[in-house]
Amino acid sequence: MAINESSPHVEGMEEYLNRGIKDVIIEHPTLEAILDDYDIGCGACMVGTCLLKDIVDVHGLPPETERALMGRITKVIYPDTEIDIPEDDGKAQAERIFVYSPPVQVLVDEHKLIKRLIALIPCITKSMDLTTEDGRQLVLEGIDFIKTYADSFHHAKEEDLLFKYFDEDSEIVSAFHEDHRNARDHVKNIVEGVSEQDGARVTKHLGAYKELLQGHIKREDEILYPWMDRNISSEQEAELAASFDEVADKFGNVNERYEAFVQRLEKSFLNNIFPYYR
């Protein structure tokens, strides 16, 4: 970052780099738009406790792009600082192609099935009738997918295996743990809402779960996983692959079973069983 070394603000940037990104954005709101230019959607993040310095590091930006980003951030915080900002607005980041290690690719592939399920949530809520056994069963089958496949199978591999190779007290990893906890809280509310036949409560938390998971998966696929892949050794990668195989053996045909469930649900809606979907 090309900042005039004689500037009294150079040391002051260290304090900002060690603050939570949401706090920095609240103090300097224009930073959100700058981060968006580099496809760093911190403003929309529901946690926002990641440190500014970690946000920059974890995205793995090319050196010139990082210099340009940090130059623009510093100029907002210290407008009178002399900064040479390279001409790089980060737009090329949108064209990135992500290549994952084999075990991480497994997690990315599982995301594809989870995204198919959450894409059906609006259909589920619009057709929902909790006064009938069939209506309640439709929601509970979706919750079974979330609890068993998305959480016990997929999230557990992240929390119990992948994340263990990193400092779990770091703000970056903690933010994804917090997403998982929030998702489980939504599921708890959905189950209670079904039991009480409270359609408004179920609809609210299904929608919130969908919104949470959509952002969570995008950040994992495009930010967290690439960063973790850059920081695990080949030996750790092999260990992780073996551990994932053990989990797959334990859960048996979980992928095939829930793939079939999602396919049945998709077919039901696409066959116009529910009039609103026409």
Image (spheres, rainbow, N blue to C red):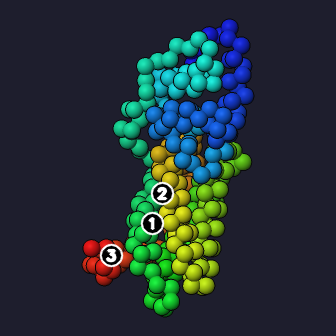
Q: Distance from label 1 to label 3 (Cα)?
A: 18 Å
Disc 2 element: helix
Query: Relative to 23, is 154 on the left or the right?
Result: left
Q: Residue at x 31, y 73 (%)?
A: 277
The residue drawn where x is 38% and y is 41% is 97
Amino acid under label 1? Ile
Q: Are marks 1 and 2 in contact (CB under 8 Å)?
A: yes
Q: Which residue is mark 3?
A: 276
**Badge 2 is on which residue?**
214
**Disc 1 on helix, strand or loop?**
helix
Mark 2 residue type: Gln
Q: Position of residue 101 (x, y in %)?
A: 46, 48
Where 276 falls versus 219 (above or below)?
below
What amino acid does circle 3 point to? Tyr
* Relative height, residue 180 to residue 23 (above, below): below
Task: Tell me the CA gap for discs 1 and 2.
Answer: 8 Å
Image quarter for residue 31? top right
| Residue 40 vs residue 97, the one in the foreground | 40
Q: Which residue is mark 1?
A: 118
Between the residue at mark 3 and the residue at mark 2, the CA separation in whole angstroms equals: 23 Å
Residue 93 location, x and y as percent? Answer: 41, 35
Q: Position of residue 128 (x, y in %)?
A: 45, 80
Q: Which quarter of the figure has residue 147?
A: bottom right
The reply to whether the C-beta atoms of the residues labelled 3 and 2 are less than 8 Å apart is no
State the residue at coordinates (48%, 76%): 142
- Image coordinates of residue 63 in percent, x first then y, are 50, 24
